[in-house]
């Protein structure tokens, strides 16, 4: 703003001095390694100017800022006068106008930079509360300005002091890596800013779930679940696992790693705490590839849906010519009902817009015996609609063939044992009755018997002639 002076309350001078207000909010970090390799101390605020001689004061020595803008004054963090192993507190202040010094209560704390020798485990969940233990020397949290932190790659997390040789770290959101990507550097700091140097044993690879197929399972079927994700690498002595349910009520099944991006496990036949009357019900799904002591379970919106397999009562129509495709309405039994798998998927955490973008089809299907399967459409709780599947069967090879119609709510598990509905495919082959078959067999048997008798008679005649 412009500053002008008046001596009589009316006439102002023409100097037009430039004047501005500033405020200092905070400085970070307030502690750092004594070796001087901790980075800048960032003083945050507003109204800072480069032409007002801002300056920093640390341990009685004045330093020029490394950079200044309207909201930051960045002060250098010089090495401690006491050497790399120095531990102690020094005064710290900053001036934004070159005149008024603003000291920070508590000053600035120097400490010896810790060293990390190893981390364990070297893989864990990309999202969740997986624990990573840092082992080394020089860890401490015995001073007021301590602010322990850790990071995996560029993902920052919380660190907890355990002992001078151990710090425990939790990073809740780490990006997944491709199979050919290098593992991420794992680092820790006593000020959440000046991180430790890397070693050959301080790299970490996260794992995570992107989707499961199918995402719904009939109770009692023990369906196979294929998990798609990244970071699936076996660890010696650790069994990969899938968990269905919450930490308070869950079921766990062993998993088999198929590749870096796929593993498979079985859904449990029943979910604890899920009475049949509450089905269909969705529960959280997670995987673990490291030991239970490391809180290894993934956290994601992926949900597993459990449902009662519906019973089929009838279909309409009940027959069709072979080769012709027609709509078939399938009706559930009175004590059973259908549900819309897409709607349940959306309520279980799937984004319905994502379904539309991906062009995903409903997993609802009908099976017509050996003639094949077709996608079905949910109409209401008692009726679904599907079409007869296309077939390579020639009409002239079939007279009439009746099959059981089965339905799958997840595209994988069909309910043949719970279906009373039959459907007939009609062809153009001539009708051959059971009686016709019997007579044909008798005729063949008679011809064979007669041939045997003729052969025996000729043999006797030849014997007598000789």
Image (tube, rainbow, N blue to C red):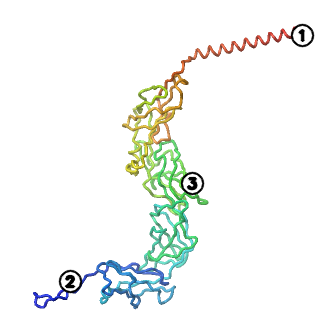
Taking the image as drawn, is residue 91 in sight?
Answer: no
Q: Does residue 408 sit above or below 462 in this rendering? A: below
Proximity of marks 2 and 3: CB atoms separated by less than 8 Å: no
**Residue marked by disc 2:** 2
Q: Nearer the viewer, residue 291 or 364?
A: 364
The mark total stands at 3
Judged by depth in the image, the label closer to the viewer, 2 or 3, is 2
* Residue 397: mark in rendering: none
**Which element type, helix, strand or loop, lies under badge 3?**
strand
| Category of crowding for the residue at label 2, using alpha-carbon neighbours closer than 10 angstroms: few (below 14), some (14–19), many (at least 20) | few
Q: Give residue 151's position: percent from left, percent from top.
A: 47, 70
Residue found at the far right of this picture:
466
* Residue beneath the point at 81% across and 10% down: 458
* Residue 466: mark in rendering: 1
**Which element type, helix, strand or loop, lies under badge 2?**
strand
**Residue marked by disc 3:** 259
Marks 2 and 3, the one that precedes in the sequence: 2
């Amino acid at each position: 703003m412009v500053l002008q002076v008046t001596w009589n309350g009316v006439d102002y001078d023409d100097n037009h001095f430039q004047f501005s207000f500033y405020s200092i909010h905070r400085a970070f970090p307030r502690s750092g390694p004594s070796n001087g390799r901790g980075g800048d101390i960032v003083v945050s605020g507003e109204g800072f100017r480069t032409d007002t001689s801002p300056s920093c004061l640390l341990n009685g020595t004045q330093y020029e800022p490394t950079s200044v803008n309207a909201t930051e004054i960045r002060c250098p963090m010089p090495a401690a006068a006491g050497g790399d192993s120095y531990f102690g507190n020094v005064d710290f202040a900053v001036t934004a106008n070159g005149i008024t010094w603003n000291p920070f209560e508590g000053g600035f704390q120097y400490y010896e930079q810790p060293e990390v020798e190893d981390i364990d485990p070297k893989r864990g969940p990309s999202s969740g509360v997986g624990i990573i233990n840092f082992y080394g020397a020089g860890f401490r949290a015995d001073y007021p300005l301590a602010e322990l932190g850790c990071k995996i790659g560029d993902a920052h997390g919380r660190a907890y002091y355990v002992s001078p040789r151990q710090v425990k770290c939790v990073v809740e959101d780490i990006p997944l890596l491709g199979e050919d990507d290098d593992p991420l550097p794992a680092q820790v700091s006593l000020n959440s800013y000046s991180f430790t140097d890397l070693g050959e044993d301080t790299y970490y690879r996260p794992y995570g779930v992107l989707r499961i197929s199918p995402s719904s399972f009939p109770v009692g079927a023990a369906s196979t679940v294929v998990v798609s994700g990244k970071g699936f690498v076996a660890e010696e002595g650790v069994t990969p696992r899938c968990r269905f349910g919450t930490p308070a009520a869950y079921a766990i099944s062993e998993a088999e790693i198929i590749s870096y991006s796929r593993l498979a496990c079985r859904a449990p036949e029943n979910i604890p705490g899920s009475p049949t009357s509450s089905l269909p019900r969705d529960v959280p799904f997670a995987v673990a590839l490291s030991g239970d002591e490391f809180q290894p379970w993934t956290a994601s919106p992926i949900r597993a849906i459990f449902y009662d397999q519906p019973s089929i009562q009838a279909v309409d129509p009940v027959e069709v010519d072979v080769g012709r495709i027609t709509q078939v309405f399938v009706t559930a039994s009175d004590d059973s009902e259908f549900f819309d798998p897409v709607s349940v998927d959306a309520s279980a955490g799937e984004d319905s817009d994502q379904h539309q973008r991906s062009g995903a089809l409903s997993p609802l299907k009908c099976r017509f015996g050996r003639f094949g399967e077709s996608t079905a459409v949910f109409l209401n709780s008692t009726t679904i609609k599907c079409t007869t599947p296309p077939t390579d069967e020639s009409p002239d090879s079939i007279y009439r063939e009746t099959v059981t119609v089965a339905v799958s709510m997840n595209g994988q598990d069909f309910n043949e044992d719970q279906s009373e509905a039959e459907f007939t495919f009609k062809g153009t082959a001539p009708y051959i009755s059971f009686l016709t078959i019997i007579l044909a067999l008798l005729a063949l048997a008679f011809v064979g018997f007669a041939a045997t008798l003729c052969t025996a008679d000729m043999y006797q005649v030849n014997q007598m002639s000789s």
